[in-house]
Structures are given as C-alpha cells and as structure tokens.
Image: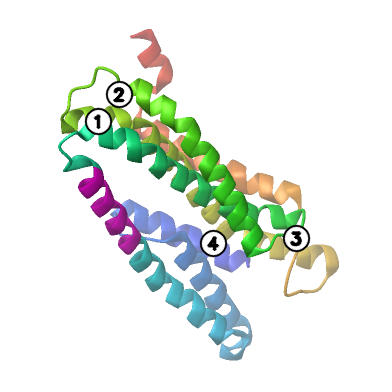
Amino acid sequence: MLAALLSAALWVNLATWIGAPVSTTHSVVGGVMGAGIAAAGFAAVNWPTMYKIAASWVISPVLGGAVAALFLWFIKSRIIYQADKITAARRWVPVLVGIMGGTFAAYLALKGLKKIMKIELSSALMIGLGIGIIIWLTMIPVIRKQSEGLENRNKSLKVLFGIPLVVSAALLSFAHGANDVANAVGPLAAIVQATSTGGFMDAVSIPIWVMGIGALGISFGLFLVWTKTNPHGWWSNHKA
C-alpha cells in the first residue's frame, strides 16, 4: 500500500507538472494493482473487479457528456431561444436548481446516511424528490426578485444563472474532493488495519483521524494551488 501511494503521488505530480491529463483514481488503482502483482503475482488481482473499474472510466464520461448535452439542449430551447427570455428563466431556473439539489440530496442519503441507518434506493429517491421540491419552491421568489428590471437579452441571463453556477461548482468540488480523498485514504486505511490487527480483511473500518489526514491533505493541496496562482497572497490584495 505504501508503494501504491508513493507511485500514485509521484505520477500525479509528474503528469500535472508536464500538463498531461491525469486521474487520481486511475493512478491509485494502478499503483495498488502493480504492487499486488509485484508482491504476489497476477493471481492476486481480482480481474472481474478491475474490469468493472476500467469500464466505469469509459461509461462515466460518456454518461456525463450525454447528460450535459441534454441539459444544454433544454436550456437553449426553453430559455435562451425563447422570445421572452426573462419569463422563461423565471419558470425554468428554479426547476433546474431543484433537480440539481434533489439529485445531490438523494446521493448523500444513499451514500452518507447508510453509514447511520439502512437506506434503500427508493427511500433515497423520495428524500431527493422532497428536498428538490423544497429547493424549487424556495428559488421561485429568489429568481423572480433577481429578474426585476432585467432587459430581455442573453446577457441578463448571466445574473439569473449566478446561483445555479455557484451551487453546481460547490457540489462538484465536494464530489471531487470526496473522491480524491477516498483514493488516498483507502490504501492508508489498509496500512492502519494491517499494523493494528496483523492481518488483512476485505473491508476495513476507517478511523476518524485517518479521514482527517485525508481532508487536511486535500485542503493543503488546494492552498498550494492558490498560493501559486496568487503569489503575493491575500494580504497584498487587501493592502492594495
């Protein structure tokens, strides 16, 4: 696991430095597989699981692109290309925000609440539907207030899409952070499990302090990226 973490860290940093497209998930999975093959041979790899993981690398971007194209078509046909753009935005922007919030709520219920209580897929969908409706109803007066006095042109739509863009960026950052932290914490949890029990298990319990290390790591990484893009720091901007 230590070899897998080191190899993934070196490769991700090298690929990022040269500007090559890289995936943390691909790197960690490949590192774990390579370390397992070096330690115990090809028989140590669960190939059916590897096939599923590799298939997800293809299926996920295809589905993501299809859903993005569908939403773009919907926004153009129902809002941008309408004669009265502001009225159309008042009707559909709250719906889009509700769909986005409801989908994320269903995901959190299915993946997060199951750690506390048993949640079936149908129950998670109902939770997402309920929260989505609440968000939709909440956003109606907000969008209506924002649209007051706006001219009927595409530039005005940027104001009304401000909240959806910020919320979607926050949800994407949360999902991306959770995924990348899990990639690094997984091998680390296996190391902790092996050193504490002296054996290996198919499923390991991750201590809170291990998850804290993962959260600290990605936060510090974001801080380093921010300092690179803002070399003078926030204090220089504040002083100016």
| Residue, disc 2 | 147
Q: Say if mark 2 contacts mark 4, CB within 8 Å.
A: no
Q: Are marks 2 and 1 in contact (CB under 8 Å)?
A: yes
Q: Please tell me whether residue 81 is drawn above or below residue 6 in the rendered image.
A: above
Q: Residue furthest right?
A: 197
Asked if 49 appears above or below 61 in the picture, the reply is below
- Whether residue 111 is visible, yes or no, is no
Q: Which residue is drawn at 52% across and 54% down?
A: 180
> Left of 51 or right of it: where is 192?
right
Q: Are marks 1 and 3 in contact (CB under 8 Å)?
A: no
Q: Name the dominant secondary structure of the magenta segment.
A: helix
Which residues are the magenta region?
A: 65-78
Seen from the viewer's position, the closer of residues 117 and 149 is 149
Dot 1 amino acid type: Ile
Residue 34 as seen in the image, left or right of residue 96: right
Disc 3 target residue: 118
Q: Residue furthest bottom?
A: 43
Give the foreground label among 4 and 1: 1
Residue that badge 1 annotates: 86
Dot 2 or dot 3: first in sequence order is 3
Mark 1 residue element: helix
Mark 1 or 3, closer to the camera: 1
Quarter of the rendering containing residue 3: bottom right
**Where is the N terminus found, in terms of image quarters?**
bottom right
Along the polypeptide, which appears first: circle 4 or circle 3? 4
The local secondary structure at tag 2 comes to loop
Q: Does the magenta stretch include residue 69?
A: yes
What's the amino acid at mark 3?
Answer: Lys
